Image (tube, rainbow, N blue to C red):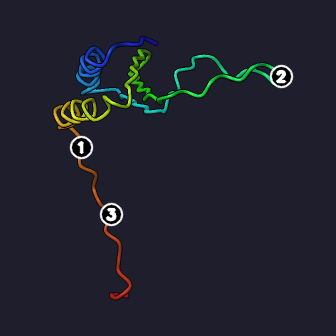
Amino acid sequence: MVLLDQDGFLNALTKMFQKSRYSGTVTLCFKRFDGHERPKPREGKKPLPEPEEYLCLIRAKCGSKTISTVVPSKDVSKFQMAYSTLLKGNLDGLKKTKKVKTKSKATQ
């Protein structure tokens, strides 16, 4: 997994969307991240300190390539705006699903 800065992540995500336009999928994952990369210590050991500020960990996977970025809470709104613009530009080729018509109870 490659940890990128926010702008590099958005650029790589754009390339992933273009690569998977005709075949393949892009999977996105948003998680709260406390800054600790190691698991919690065992019983009897000194506990990890509580973080002052939680971060947002964002991962994207396309095929076998995985990229990620960490966004601080003060930059989340700026990142969301850039991310939503990216989604609006790349989610234009979605197929419309056909709705199945069901008989209503009134006609029976």
The x and y percentages for residue 76 are 32, 32
The x and y percentages for residue 61 are 41, 23
User: Residue 104, located in which quarter of the rendered image?
Assistant: bottom left
**Number of residues whose C-alpha sits closer than 10 Å to that of mark 1, classed few (under 14), some (14–19) or many (20 or more):** few
The x and y percentages for residue 94 are 23, 40
Q: What's the residue at 25%, 27% (across, down)?
A: 22
Which residue in the protein does label 2 denote? 44
User: Residue 74, located in which quarter of the rendered image?
Assistant: top left
User: Residue 47, located in which quarter of the rendered image?
Assistant: top right
Which residue in the protein does label 3 denote? 100
**Number of residues whose C-alpha sits closer than 10 Å to that of mark 3, classed few (under 14), some (14–19) or many (20 or more):** few
Q: Nearer the viewer, residue 78 or 22?
A: 78
> Mark 2 falls on what kind of element?
loop
Q: How many dots with numbers?
A: 3
Compute the Cα span from label 1 to label 3. Answer: 16 Å
Q: What's the residue at 35%, 72% (across, down)?
A: 102
Compute the Cα span from label 3 to label 2. Answer: 59 Å
Residue type, label 1: Lys
Sequence order check: which comes first, mark 2 or mark 1? 2
Q: Nearer the viewer, residue 13 or 97?
A: 13
